[in-house]
Image: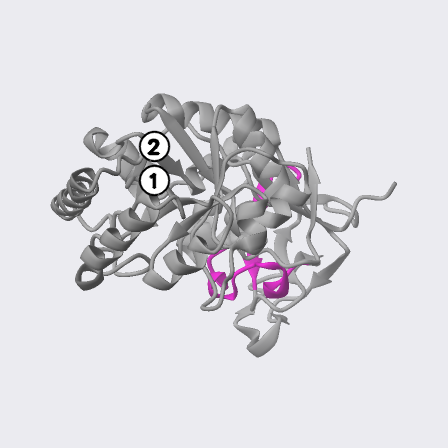
Amino acid sequence: MTAPMRRALIDSAQISANVEVLRGLAPTDHTLVVVKANGYGHGAETAARAALAGGADWLGVADVAEALELRSAGIDAPLLAWLHAPDESFREATAAGVTIGASTLAHLEALALCDNPSVHLKIDTGLGRNGAGRDDTAAFVARAAELHHAGKIRVEGLMSHCSGTSREADMSQAEEFENVMADLHARGVEPEFRHLAATAAAIDHPSLRYSMVRFGIAAYGLAPAPHLRNTGVRPAMRLEADVVLTKRLRAGDGVSYNHLWRADESTTVALIPVGYADGIPRAATGHASVALNGQRFPVVGRIAMDQIVVNVGDAQVAVGDTVSIWGDPHDGTPHPDEWADWADTIGYEIVTRLGNRVSRISA
């Protein structure tokens, strides 16, 4: 069978190995691995099964639809979803055993209409995104405790998210988190699962691990912050494509839109059938390189929707040769974080933005 000309090879064993490494770096009672956004571009089911094989005992997704997709795939591990539509009913999700991260009074009331729902209360301790805000937290916690004692919901968890702005900011958030824990305790509610720290905070601040930590991008081998690029995890995705055409250019010939690059001398270029529709960041124009036949070659000219052009000089390159765009750098392939640097973004965006023309292949 002919391989797709654009393909992301997903090493599920590497995801498992990364989770094992992370659990060693930030040990705690429970480990949640986030598999939202199609497993950060790696495939949700593949990522979920690999994370569980690596020792995770919880999985996390953004929304109910992602959770139900995993349940439909036969994954029955504890599963948390925390970002919801304004009119979310939660009935189907809770019937499927999905735990709900609730952020508003409306969420609590909707959950109270379900059959024995498990809930993690989500509060905003300073990130300024999802979660009950400071002015709303007291009423939110009070109502959650009422519904818990009435048997309408089971408050099993309390969650928030660090901003990573500074150690001082994270510790300030922890203080607010603990104040809410104390409020729940005073109301007779003792959540088993208390989680504030994602990857960076879990590694950097042992005191913030509580009873569960959440690992996201690092489970896929990328760093959540520059200072964590040497934690021992390795990329689990290798993006490849085939050379579909080669041609010889003369000195002065231009390549791609606006001729941002012109050949200084006679040279060979190779055409690669990936572009920004496939997730290659256009902002990396003029900076990127790829690996081909054991060498690095620069991407030249404007990155287009469907294709990039690589200047291979006088190297022997043929149609059908494999180009490694990003992956594990041990063989000279660019790391996704390199692409992030070239495009002035973060590694998260590089791997999650892959388009649907790219075939995911479990390797």
Work out how far the residue at label 1 is from the one at label 2, CA to CA, in angstroms: 10 Å
The residue sitting at the bottom extreme is: 258
Which corner quadrant holds the N terminus? top right
Q: Where does residue 166 sit, x and y in percent of width and height?
A: 17, 47
Quarter assignment of residue 171: top left
Q: Where does residue 279 sit, x and y in percent of width and height?
A: 58, 59
Q: Residue at x 46, y 60 (%)?
A: 84
Q: How many marks?
A: 2
Q: Where does residue 237 sit, x and y in percent of width and height?
A: 58, 40
Q: Residue at x 63, y 40 (%)?
A: 45
Mark 1 in CB contact with mark 2 (< 8 angstroms): yes
Q: Which mark is residue 53?
A: none
Q: Nearer the viewer, residue 242 or 151?
A: 151
Q: Which mark is residue 157?
A: 1
Q: Which residue corresponds to mark 2? A: 212
Please state if 322 lies on the left or on the right of 121 as rendered: right
Please give the range of residues in magenta: 274-300
Quarter assignment of residue 201: top left
Q: Does the segment drawn in magenta span residue 296?
A: yes
Q: Residue at x 32, y 26 (%)?
A: 26
Q: Is residue 124 visible?
A: no
Q: Residues within 10 Å of mark 1 (few under 14, many from 20)?
A: many
- Give SS at disc 1: strand
